[in-house]
Amino acid sequence: GIYIDVFCSLKHGVNISKTANQIQSAIFNSITTMTAIEPQQINIHIRSIVAEK
C-alpha cells in the first residue's frame, strides 16, 4: 500500500485537528480519484505554527 507523510506549517489560530483532517481527506480523495489506489496511511506532521503578519 501507499504510505504518505505530509509536513506542513499552520497559521496561528487555526483549528489544528480540523485542518489536519481536511488535509488528510483532500489527499486521500485526490490520490484515490487519480490512481484508483487507496492510501493505507496518510500522516500529517505539523512542523510549526506561524504567526500572522
Image: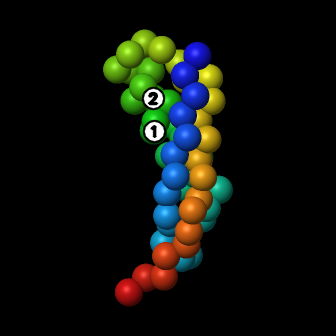
Disc 1 target residue? 26
Q: Which mark is residue 29?
A: 2
User: Could you tell me residue 51's position as x and y percent?
Assistant: 48, 82
Residue in the image at 44% along x and 21% along y: 32
Direction left: furthest residue: 34
Which element carries disc 2, helix, strand or loop?
Answer: helix
Residue 3 in which image quadrant = top right
Residue in the image at 49% along x and 64% along y: 9
Instruction: Check contact, mark 1 vs mark 2: CB within 8 A.
Output: yes
Residue in the image at 51% along x and 45% along y: 6
Q: Nearer the viewer, residue 10 or 1?
A: 1
- In whole angstroms, how far apart are the C-alphas of marks 1 and 2? 5 Å
- Position of residue 17 relative to residue 2, above or below, is below
Residue in the image at 48% along x and 14% along y: 37
Residue type marked 2: Asn
Task: Count residues near mark 2 (Cα–Cα under 10 Å), then give few for <14, some for 14-19, many for 20+.
Answer: some
Q: Nearer the viewer, residue 47 or 42?
A: 47
Residue 19 visible, this angle:
yes
Residue 22 visible, this angle:
no
Task: Count residues near mark 1 (Cα–Cα under 10 Å), then give few for <14, some for 14-19, many for 20+.
Answer: few
